[in-house]
Image (spheres, rainbow, N blue to C red):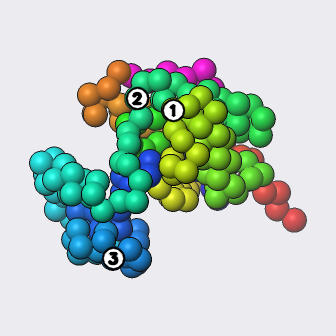
């Protein structure tokens, strides 16, 4: 039984189909991106070094249709405000959130909305907020695609992912993030279905 969703998505251009770390893509549709490297489906067992990854994305800058941008502290705050409004409007329960320079991790308790709907709503609301504020222009994509979802089934899964998400900023050399829309996990699990 699914009790929560770990939702992950990247900023535009920051996880390409031929990313040296591997990807969830089955094909490369843009020829100028295909020239950057071979497609590898799934995470590679041996991960590239930081210099290798930087070189790949330095080369990607000239192959992308739009400028490769990361999120400043101001943009991060705007995204967080948009998430707060969406979480309140749709009555989501969020147990963890990390808004990184080039991607997002968020853990949301099971809800009537499917994970794909949650992803789409959070992306749309934050994109609108960035454009309204002038942090992005309307033609420039904010997000790099529909993102990924991981289904969590146990209290242990939720606690492990909360710890992982909380540690993400520290691991990247950023300050710890605390957001008012994130609630402390209270051990919630749905009641089992009644037997007939």
Residue at position x 38%, y 39% in the image: 70
Q: Which residue is mark 1?
A: 135
Precedes in sequence: disc 2 or disc 3: 3
Classify mark 3: helix, strand or loop: helix
Circle 1 residues within 10 Å: few <14, some 14–19, many ≥20: some
Q: Are marks 1 and 2 in contact (CB under 8 Å)?
A: yes
Q: Is residue 90 left or right of residue 155?
A: right
Percent across and percent down for residue 190 are 71, 46
Q: Which residue is mark 3?
A: 31
Q: Is residue 61 left or right of residue 50?
A: right
Would you place residue 89 above or below residue 118 in this image? above
Give how far apart the Cα atoms at labels 2 and 3 are.
30 Å
Give how far apart the Cα atoms at labels 1 and 2 are.
9 Å
Residue at position x 47%, y 23% in the image: 74
Percent across and percent down for residue 103 are 42, 44
Instruction: State the image quarter where residue 90 is shown.
Output: top right
Q: Which residue is mark 2?
A: 72
Percent across and percent down for residue 170 are 31, 28
Q: Are marks 2 and 3 in contact (CB under 8 Å)?
A: no
Would you place residue 163 above or below residue 124 in this image? above
Stretch in magenta: 176-182
* Nearest to viewer (mark 1 / mark 2): 1
Percent across and percent down for residue 161 are 45, 42
Residue 150 visible in rendering: no
Classify mark 1: helix, strand or loop: loop
């Amino acid at each position: 039984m699914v009790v929560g969703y770990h939702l992950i998505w990247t900023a535009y251009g920051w996880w390409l189909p031929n990313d040296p770390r591997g990807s969830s893509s089955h094909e490369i549709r843009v020829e100028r991106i295909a020239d950057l490297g071979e497609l590898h489906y799934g995470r590679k067992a041996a991960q590239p070094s930081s210099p290798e990854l930087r070189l790949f994305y330095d080369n990607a800058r000239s192959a992308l249709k739009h400028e490769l941008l990361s999120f400043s502290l101001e943009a991060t705050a705007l995204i967080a405000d948009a998430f707060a409004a969406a979480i309140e409007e749709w009555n989501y329960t969020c147990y963890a959130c990390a808004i990184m320079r080039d991607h997002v991790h968020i853990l949301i308790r099971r809800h009537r909305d499917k994970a794909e709907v949650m992803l789409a709503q959070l992306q749309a609301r934050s994109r609108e907020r960035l454009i309204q504020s002038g942090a992005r222009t309307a033609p420039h994509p904010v997000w790099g695609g529909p993102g990924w979802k991981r289904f969590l089934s146990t209290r242990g899964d939720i606690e492990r992912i909360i710890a992982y998400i909380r540690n993400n900023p520290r691991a990247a050399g950023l300050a710890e993030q605390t957001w008012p829309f994130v609630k402390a996990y209270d051990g919630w699990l749905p009641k089992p279905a009644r037997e007939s």
